[in-house]
Image: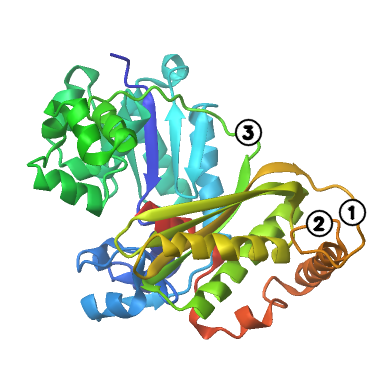
Amino acid sequence: MGEANILHVDLDAFYASVEQMLRPELKGKPVLVGGGVVLAASYEARAFGVSAPMGVRRALELCPSAIVVNGSFDRYAELSEAVMDICADMTPLVEQISIDEAFLDVSGSIHLLGEPSKIGAEVRRRVRIEVGLPISVGIASTKFLAKVASAQAKPDGLLFIDPDTELEWLHRLPVRVIWGVGPVTDEKLSAHGVHTVGQLAATPRETLVRWLGAGSGNHLHSLAWNLDHRRVTVGGRAGSVGSQSALGRGLDDDAALGRTLLSIADRVAARLRKKGRAGRTITVRVRFDDMSSVTRSVTFPAAVSTTGALHHASLPLLASARTSHDGPVTLVSISVSHLEPGEALQLELPFDSGHPTRAGSPSGAAHRMIDERVDQARARFGKDSVGRASVLLDESGRGVPDEFRKLAEKD
């Protein structure tokens, strides 16, 4: 049993809290951040059953008095950075896992700053005074349990889990607090009479494997006993670049999904080029309305970084994923891995027209030249100044800024 030296800090309803801070007239009122899809909801809105990702129309049916705002990612990024700077003052071991949450290992700071609970309280005090936002902190012996603790501490609280009684505390909680237990898994476990983490822990591992499969069964059994050996790691260079789009209640129209995929490909390709990178493996993940997900990928001989290449590679992957599952698509993502430096283009033989996924073919080179011109125009006139017509003219995709996409995964 280890010491409780790991903190999980999580800004409460971050985007909505920022809007309430920037606009005092919104304090205490139900606030929705997003366009067609809710990307964040204030606690006042959550009390009516609103959550992300949810279509704004449905959210307003649940909470007619809600105020919908588009938000400003520039401010969110700035405030997030300020919070992470405060965390870095407490320990050099800060692992930021999203714009609004991070793990801290404070084992090396105790002799200077005091016990972990004192450090957590100081983080909360400074974030409230210096940044103006509420933040919840969970403290435990593992990353898993610290994250569970911060969720239980919300809103705007601190919870320390004593290692001597951590299993007793954990086993009283509903099974859905465990990573990997979504609505489908929760329903399966409930059908077998498993409602609490303690009941999950008491279920033999081999039984869980039979019910849920080897991966989920072993994973959930380990976490039910708080067996999590992951360390807090300070991030190095990203091994992949990706983005996603939440689609509210779902899409099943091929043309609309194709436009969504093109928009995502444009974002991912622009990020790759900005980083001076290209990748050989393209992965598409599709989530359906029953919360199940299907992943498909393809690897090319040469790395690519153009919008055309990513779009052309992703379309058949999306089609393949949809043939394996019925129902509307509620989220789709593209990620590019096996990254390499995006160096000067090497032309290929033979000199036929080629394909966008062949970076050195005439077609691939033409797509690269177009993207370079688009990058130049956006750098001068703004990111929304130029883009693919089918995306820019598609009203259904507006109002959901790219930088909000990760929040859809979180909930």
Q: Quadrant of the C terminus?
A: bottom left
Q: Is residue 259 above or below residue 152?
A: below
Q: Secondary structure at mark 1?
A: loop
Asked if the residues shown at circle 2 and circle 3 are in contact, with their CB atoms under 8 angstroms apart, the answer is: no
Q: Secondary structure at mark 2?
A: loop
* Amino acid at pointer 2: Ala
| Residue 262 located left or right of residue 280 | left
Q: Which numbered marker is on residue 236? A: 3
Residue 294 place in picture, x, y as percent: 43, 54
Specify the quadrant of the image occupied by residue 150.
top left
Seen from the viewer's position, the closer of residues 109 and 209 is 209
Give the mark toward the camera: 1 or 3.
1
Residue 11 place in picture, x, y as percent: 39, 49
Q: Quadrant of the N terminus?
A: top left
Residue 204 place in picture, x, y as percent: 16, 26
Residue assigned mark 1: 348
Specify the quadrant of the image occupied by residue 105.
top left
Q: CA distance from mark 1 to mark 2?
A: 8 Å
